[in-house]
Image (spheres, rainbow, N blue to C red):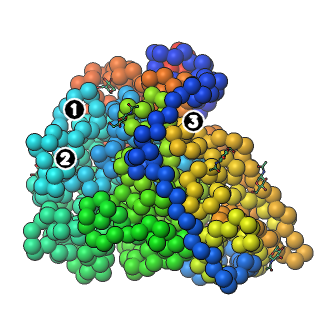
Amino acid sequence: MFLPILWALCFVNTARAVTVYGQIPFGQTSAAATQTGAGAAPTDTSSSLLAAYDETILRPPTLPQDQSLNFTLNLAATNASVPWLSIMQHGSFYGFSIEMSVVTQLMGKNSSHLQVPFLNLMGQIQQRSGGVHIRIGGNTQDFAVYVDDIPDGHATAKEKSDLKNPTLTPAVLYSKELFYLAASISSLVNVRWYLGIPFNDTNWRLQIAEYGQAILGDRLIGLQGANEPDYYLSHGHRTEPYGPFEYHGEFGQLIEAMKNNPNIPIKNMLIGPSLASGPWTPEQMWETDYINVYKDSLVAITMEHYPSNNCFVRFNVGSYVDPQEAFPTFLTHQSALSLVEPYRHTSNLAREAGKPFIMFETNTATCGGLPGISDSFGAGLWALDYGLTMAATNFSHALLHVGGQNVYYNPFTAPPTNQSSFNQWTIGAIYYSVIIVAEIFGKSNVSQIVDTSNNGLLTPSYAIYDNGALDKVALFNFMDDPTGAHDITGTITVNGGQVPAQVHVKYFAASSVSVKTNLTWAGQTYGNKFKVDGRPKGELNITTIPCDQAANLCNVPVKAPGFALVFFNDPRTVETEVTPITFETSAFTKTINTVTIDPEVLATSNGQSGKERAKLGSTSFGSVNGAEGLRALVPAFSILVAMVCGAGVVMMAR
Ligand SMILES: *[C@@H]1O[C@H](CO)[C@@H](O)[C@H](O)[C@H]1NC(C)=O
Ligand SMILES: *[C@@H]1O[C@H](CO)[C@@H](O)[C@H](O)[C@H]1NC(C)=O
Ligand SMILES: *[C@@H]1O[C@H](CO)[C@@H](O)[C@H](O)[C@H]1NC(C)=O
Ligand SMILES: *[C@@H]1O[C@H](CO)[C@@H](O)[C@H](O)[C@H]1NC(C)=O
Ligand SMILES: *[C@@H]1O[C@H](CO)[C@@H](O)[C@H](O)[C@H]1NC(C)=O
Ligand SMILES: *[C@@H]1O[C@H](CO)[C@@H](O)[C@H](O)[C@H]1NC(C)=O
Ligand SMILES: *[C@@H]1O[C@H](CO)[C@@H](O)[C@H](O)[C@H]1NC(C)=O
Ligand SMILES: *[C@@H]1O[C@H](CO)[C@@H](O)[C@H](O)[C@H]1NC(C)=O
Ligand SMILES: *[C@@H]1O[C@H](CO)[C@@H](O)[C@H](O)[C@H]1NC(C)=O
């Protein structure tokens, strides 16, 4: 409850800027400063060699000969009897899975050194959905090792190469700073976290659960027990025999170890089985009765899957996937349908067991993504369609994976360290997909979606009900034709009701499925390569389309390519209630991308020394220690708010 209050306090002071503490006086963080800096900033082109900045542009797929361009969606006015209507969905449906080894690049070096663009990017989602779910983990979580201290006070580090693990990837070291870093972020934007218990062997290293629960409190929403265990045998983490039954047994051992550990007060927040659905099918896992046996320990049922891979190029494994040949397979609704097909039964099992079903890690292609595809506008349309299909199939959440500068598929990428003083961030088209899905489901928690596609695989569509009433329609056009000859018109009619006098449309647009630049959502862009600070730029453009109420229809055009979100109720009336959460910095100084919160203030803000910060953490969210914790929290957060709002210049009355 106190977080909104804190924000309200900030807004009262009209002080939404987070300023570099102790350096730049509050109030001087003007746009002018930003622009001057931007104009003067050099750009390093050497980084285009890194995958995240790759310039490959593929040819758009050839156009179909016999595609009908006009179609009618006859939609029920209410949710009362819509076949296959989904469960209630949240705006936080799409979240992120951040590889443990890149946490310090993306989130901040430690709790007193946060990445401002990251806060803004999360704030954009929170503004629409109320919050964001982030998993810290991935392949690197299994070999993670807790250490008391990391040089420079950073949250994570790579282990020195003389201590290499069997796959020759240095283990990730993490300290308590990792949890303080996450907690600091959660004090500014409503992010909730999933963590993963290392599972490379069964000598359980449980510090991640112990410190996670102590420091993050109710901001920790799940602990993953194994990451893609169906690959453990082929990756050399286990020896034969290792199948679903062996994993099932180990999961039981983990539950036992947690039960016997007094430093893990909450026993029932495990997440599994997180199969890659490669070697083992979900059905093989369910044959072990995993859900029934472990349902009291599980908070969610999870799977991880990518439709394609770049493993031949990266690791000389498997066979070569040609991006140009693969591109058309992403630009059709068939991709989403095929991706959810193996999970329809699992989705029902999870619902029957009363557990959320989460696609815990996904993206365009594993082993780093595919050049030309993963960061294209086409991938943005693909991720949007895939997300909505998952939602329509009763997945509760899906997390898009984020790696470092050496992958193609990132929703967001921090500049290489040696360029961070003059280059800003880069986002991939799939970041827009997350923003749009957040907007589609919004904050009501009573949004339902149904796949209404009836005009072939290149023009899928969905209807969204909110609080029982038809509220939005989503229309896709995967075709790519700059002449306009393949623009489509979706005609919406309402069955058992009437169309409104007008609808309000936001378009997701770019010149071609192949491009990576000049993407816009409702006329606004987050910026091209190296230009992203996490805030949208340009005028919001919502198109008003009059409907024909006598004929009970609205005609909504969608360009080839493009996506339209049709609102039955003016989205501006909803949005004006929402105060955007944005953080500004004075920008383009050495410390441009960071918020520095004075560690002294953090360490002593509830009257405790730095040494006792575990205690501060455990009371931070008022959940672990109940009422006493909440009392301890108030002064700590007042100071933090003063500091965050006014950077130590504007002091708040307490
Ligand atoms: C499709 O609908 C639009 C808008 O109603 C109309 O202008 C166009 O002629 C139609 N095209 C075809 C092929 O029917
Ligand atoms: C598991 O990982 C830890 C930390 O990296 C390492 O010390 C241990 O030897 C690993 N166990 C196996 C069986 O590889
Ligand atoms: C956090 O990281 C910054 C930047 O590397 C460093 O200067 C600072 O000392 C670190 N803070 C702590 C508490 O170690
Ligand atoms: C999703 O759950 C709803 C119940 O809330 C059910 O009616 C619907 O059939 C389910 N959809 C799928 C694809 O299983
Ligand atoms: C940054 O580091 C990379 C890799 O070490 C190097 O190729 C590049 O030239 C450096 N750029 C600058 C601006 O120093
Ligand atoms: C929606 O759900 C979130 C997370 O469970 C909760 O914090 C929020 O208060 C809910 N909103 C409404 C309007 O019920
Ligand atoms: C329709 O929406 C209302 C309000 O959100 C909800 O209570 C009801 O269960 C929904 N009905 C169906 C069939 O999903
Ligand atoms: C992107 O937009 C800018 C400004 O409107 C324009 O100058 C530039 O040519 C566009 N780039 C592409 C690739 O369309
Ligand atoms: C707003 O968007 C519509 C639809 O894409 C477009 O026709 C119009 O030119 C845009 N208006 C502005 C001011 O950019």
Vertical comparison of 156 with 58: above or below:
above
Does the CB distance between marks 2 and 3 fall below 8 Å?
A: no
Q: Which mark is residue 150?
A: 1
Name which residue lies at 30% across and 55% down: 138
Q: Residues within 10 Å of mark 3 (few under 14, many from 20)?
A: many
Percent from the top left, x then y, of residue 352?
40, 76
Residue at the extreme bottom? 66
Q: Is residue 476 visible?
A: no
- As measured in the structure, the alpha-carbon distance from the residue carrying label 1 to the one carrying label 3 is 31 Å
Please tell me whether mark 1 sits on a helix, a strand or a loop. loop
Q: Nearer the viewer, mark 2 or mark 3?
A: 2
Up-down: is 193 above or below 298? above
The image quadrant where one finds ligand 1 is bottom right
Mark 2 Cβ and ligand 2 under 8 Å apart: yes
Q: Amino acid at mark 3?
A: Thr
Mark 3 residue element = loop
**Where does the image place residue 365, in percent across and percent down from the top left?**
39, 64
Viewer-side residue, 378 vs 296: 378
Q: Specify the amino acid type for callout 1.
A: Ile
Disc 3: which residue: 582
**Structural crowding at the residue carrying mark 1, measured as other residues with C-alpha within 10 Å and reported as few (<14), some (14–19) or many (≥20):** some
Residue on which the image places disc 2: 171
CB atoms of marks 1 and 3 within 8 Å: no
Q: Alpha-carbon neighbours of circle 2 within 10 Å: few (<14), some, or many (≥20)?
A: many
Tell which tag, 1 or 2, sits nearer the viewer: 2
- Going from N to C along the chain, the mark reached first, 1 or 3, is 1
